[in-house]
Amino acid sequence: MQRRTLLKLATMAGAATLAGRMPLAFAQDKTPIKVGILHSLSGTMAISETSLKDVALMTIDQINADGGVLGRKLEPVVVDPASNWPLFAERARQLLTQDKVAAVFGCWTSVSRKSVLPVFEELNGLLFYPVQYEGEEMSRNVFYTGAAPNQQAIPAVEYLLSDEGGAAKRIFLLGTDYVYPRTTNKILRAFLNSKGIKDSDIQEVYTPFGHADYQTIVADIKQFSQGGKTAVVSTINGDSNVPFYKELGNQGLSAQDVPVVAFSVGEEELRGIDTKPLVGHLAAWNYFMSVDTPANKTFTKTWADYVKSANLPGGAGRVTNDPMEATWVGMQLWRQAVEKAGTAEVDAVRRAIVGQSVDAPSGFKLTMDGNHHLHKPVMIGEIQEDGQFEVVWNTEGPVRAQPWSPYIAGNEGKPDVVA
Amino acid sequence: MESGLRPQPGRGPFSPEHRLKTCLNHARQLCLRLLMLVLLTGIMTPALAMEDGILTALAGRDFAAKSQAVSQLIEAVATGDAQARELVLSLATNDVPNVRLNNILRQRIGAAASVLALESPDRAARAQAVQALLSSPPPAVLVPIVEAAIAREQDAHLQERLALLTALMGLQAADAGQRRDAVQRVAETGDPQYRTRLLDLLERNPDGSWVEPDESVRQATTEGIASLDAADRRARQVGTVFAGISLGSVLLLAALGLAITYGLIGVINMAHGEFLMIGAYATFVVQNLFRQYAPEAFDWYPLAAVPAAFLAAALVGVVLERLVLRHLYGRPLETLLTTFGVSLLLMQSIRMLFGAQNVEVMNPSWMSGGLTLMPGLLLPWNRLAIILFALIVVAIAWLVLNHTRLGLFVRAVTQNRGMAACAGVPTHRVDTQAFAFGAGIAGLGGCALSQIGNVGPDLGQAYIIDSFMVVVLGGVGQLAGTIVGAFGLGILSKTIEPFWGAVLAKIAVLLLIILFIQKRPQGLFALKGRSVEA
């Protein structure tokens, strides 16, 4: 009796173990691929980053409606690091270890990117970074779909110095106090010196994140401009831009007297400001919502439909801008790379994505280079009364990125492509 | 055939002579008409062709072509071409579709349009045109039109402004004496915006020679620039003091409520910043209500927002005091922690109600722009309004504290709670009322902050530290302490900021306060008396 019971139990246990060991390969093909979205939805950067989360969700919906990637649906995992830089690193680690996402689309400020970089390199994750930045970085785990300094900052300052841009003789560099404005201004100072602008004709001023009182700074700009035709290069980030532009408007500093070119202000940041006194001030990007191409018409229409269907706050007033286009481009490139590699595994995707191109809404074909940056066109636009930008200058075609700027000493020996 | 001709006696309407005459008449009229048509077309076609050429260039991308087109247009205006005038005026008001202008081109066209506006019969239009021309000089070819307008001008005030414009144009005069007079006239205005015009006279040519050949003119220019610099320094000093007073008024509004509650109850209220935030959001709600139900009265919404902000914050204050603080008197550490938790709670409720992002609070139109006090000094209206508002709030607080029963009780309880209770003061009720009053004042502060900064769930976090700094510096129990502390800190921060930058200025102010309270821990104006610490 006992032996029979024992045999029965043993057979049942054996069968159960074998069943547990059955390969589930068939079921795995249809499970969704998780994709992380790491943008601040609260705090000082929420004004800029919330639309990036929205456009990422829209692109995921679009891709899923198109059949998904490798026949699998994409599942977004949205986290809110709340403009808190250490929290960015924590959330990135959570996305990679707990949620096991295949790729992360996120970050805006360079300090947030620098915080998450060690996490991505340690855990071998993939980050798609859609915002213009200061260069000086070329990580094998990051794909930079935003502009490097030679695709935004340098052409913009060249424009300001030219007759067309106002023939500025003095430059006022105003930024938020963190790595991106400091490094960009270092590059710009070297560039300006090489163009014959002396250090006495350059002034650098920094304000902390969230700073709201620009009275003395605008007064400083006015005084600086009495020494010769002045232009302001603004690398202010986040909601500090709103009181800055309000103060410019209130103090009557018009674009014809002292033009201000901003690198982190787009259609989204201007949404909450009365732009009538700001007409003529400039921004430099690789895309504007007003660009008239069929690809952009489709893009803005899809966005408008998504805003309505998802009932996003702001309704018909919602706009598209350069980092949103870069997010969309990054997701298309990732999708193409996964389809080419046949798997969402990081190392395979990393190899497959180099050389991929996308017909972007800006009207140009953007290619992912071996240096993990895109070839992007440069556009300079002037603010219009309705908060849109009108393009007043642009390059003929896409420009290759130079992440290691020649204007910073010690960059000569740096590698040209990622190993 | 009815020809309408009166029949001549002896000649009928169908006689051969008459018919010939009619034919010749018609032929002559036809010829005249054809001639006029040809002439007009001959005159118009070049004008039309030129206009088309200019518009085509302006619609394109080539800056050199556009610049050339604008020069051509302005030269046409100088010759008196009516079409060109029309085009310039339309371009200046953005009424021409499909042209792409940038700042430089818009400036040149704007200057030409201002010159044309000098001929307007409307005085206001002429005044505006003169103002525009003083900042953007008229193109050289249009100077004769300007001079004609100056000769024609009757209005005394405008004549004075036009004299200044003549002086500015005279900086390029042929005669050295005229140039020198022009330099002196410009320097007398004391307006720093003309400094760059004078600087141009001290430029050197690429070959090293002076642009301005006459030595006495250069001398006068150097002196003129020095006097403009002196005027500018004075204006900037006043500007810095104003900025300091403006910052001080904001700090005052933020810290006044805290001084009252901290002074009265001795509670360290970490949720004080959230009262500011509640006042700002109350303003946002009132603004939306006005936008929806009374858009024509939108400019007056701050009048309704002020009591709304006070009541909203006071209500939350009453609830906080009754439910939480009442149970924690005499336990400062627990109060600190609890109010910190309450502040997180309040922030999260606002996030749930209004969303985590900033909300938009538009200034009413009378708050845009500013008051030009001196040449080179512009005081924005919104900041002037807030300074006035802060002074009114302080006046009200002073009245309440010194001339009402509630104020009497508050002062009594602050000085000696036990004795006041013995004397029959209902201390618990006074606590609630005073806390509500302090919270309400913080709400008013939030209403003011919504006009000059961003309104978001973490508005309070930016001001809580500053509020505590003011209260610590000024001492509790007396309004004078808070007032002096707030304005002192404001002026000090704004004086340091131009030299060291905003970040270092904040650090410097904190260090100074730490050093100060080493010497005088009770603050600037502390209540004297034995039981003040009780």
Image: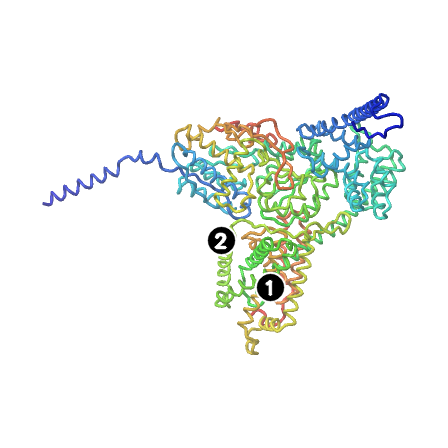
Residue of label 2: B352
Q: Looking at this rendering, what residue extends furthest in the bottom direction?
A: B423
Labels 1 and 2 share a subunit: yes
Nearest the viewer among B410 and B311 is: B311
Establish if B188 lies above or below A189: below
State how far apart marks 1 and 2 are (Cα): 30 Å
Residue visible at 61% across and 28% down?
Answer: A395
Q: Chain of mark 2?
A: B
Nearest the viewer among B219 and B296 is: B296
State the mark number for residue B259: 1
Q: Is residue B507 visible?
A: no
Nearer the observer: mark 1 or 2; the answer is 2
> Residue A83, position in %: x, y?
52, 46
| Quadrant assignment for the N terminus of chain B | top right
Residue visible at 61% across and 67% down?
Answer: B477
State the mark number for residue B513: none
Q: Chain of mark 1?
A: B
Q: Is residue B49 visible?
A: yes
Q: Amino acid at mark 2?
A: Met
SS at circle 2: helix
The color scheme shown is rainbow
Q: Residues within 10 Å of mark 2 (few under 14, many from 20)?
A: few
> Residue A126, position in %: x, y?
45, 35
Q: Are marks 1 and 2 in contact (CB under 8 Å)?
A: no
In which quarter of the view is residue A149 placed?
Answer: top right
SS at circle 1: helix
Q: Residues within 10 Å of mark 1 (few under 14, many from 20)?
A: many
In which quarter of the view is residue A65 placed?
Answer: top left
> Residue A293, position in %: x, y?
57, 31
Nearest the viewer among B496 and A89 is: A89
